Image: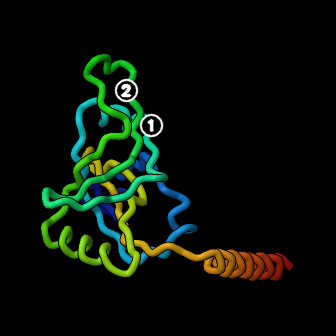
Amino acid sequence: MAKPGKKSDKSAKSGEQIVAQNRAASYNYHILEKHEAGLVLHGTEVKALREGKANIRDAYVDFHPSGAWLVNAHIAQYLPGGPWNHEPLGSRKLLLHKKEIHKLSGRAESKGLTVIPLKIYFRNSLAKVEIALVQGKKAWDRRQDERAKEARREVEESMYRNRRR
């Protein structure tokens, strides 16, 4: 048991509030490596994210000389924001170290790789994005993954039935 003044591993993870996830990413892509990036947001964007009104299904990361940008991520307008509301599909700057930006942009330009967001979440009241370097799957890759998943499910089910006897 953790001491009262110390945080355990479980409580550190519980401080993470997931806002949006790209659940189709593991189905459509081979995930090669993951990175965490900060997200530059305006006031109404933060409030809309806190309400969970975001969609990153079609989003991707674009690299410019000025840095990395999250493109095509939809953050719905915050209704009480009035005239100070943000643009729902605007590009948002990602906060990464220069080495990470150069590494990801270099790898993304070669071999048909791309960088997509996997989830947006708040950690200690800061908006973060988990981005991943991915490679697209072919149709046969998806079928093969489905077969492996189904086989794993059958094995677990049979082990469960044997334990119940």
Q: Residues within 10 Å of mark 2 (few under 14, many from 20)?
A: many
Compute the Cα span from label 1 to label 2: 9 Å
- As shown in the figure, which amino acid type bears the numbered disc 2? Tyr
Residue 41 sits in quarter: top left
Residue displayed at 33% across by 48% down: 122
The coloring applied to the image is: rainbow
- Residue named by callout 2: 78
Question: For this view, does 94 lie left or right of residue 161?
Answer: left
Residue 77 sits in quarter: top left
Percent from the top left, x then y, of residue 2?
Answer: 33, 63
| Local SS, label 1 | loop
Percent from the top left, x then y, of residue 38?
Answer: 24, 54
Labelled disc at residue 53: 1
| Local SS, label 2 | loop
Q: Is residue 44 above or below residue 93?
A: above
Quadrant assignment for the C terminus: bottom right
Q: Nearer the viewer, residue 101 or 154?
A: 101
Question: For this view, does 73 lie left or right of residue 104?
Answer: right
- As shown in the figure, which amino acid type bears the numbered disc 1? Lys
Residue displayed at 35% across by 70% down: 34
Marks 1 & 2, CB-CB < 8 Å contact = yes
Quadrant assignment for the N terminus: bottom left
Percent from the top left, x then y, of residue 53?
Answer: 44, 37
Residue 64 sits in quarter: bottom left
Residue displayed at 38% across by 48% down: 72
Whichever of labels 1 and 2 marks the residue nearer the N terminus, that label is 1
Percent from the top left, x then y, of residue 112?
Answer: 40, 76
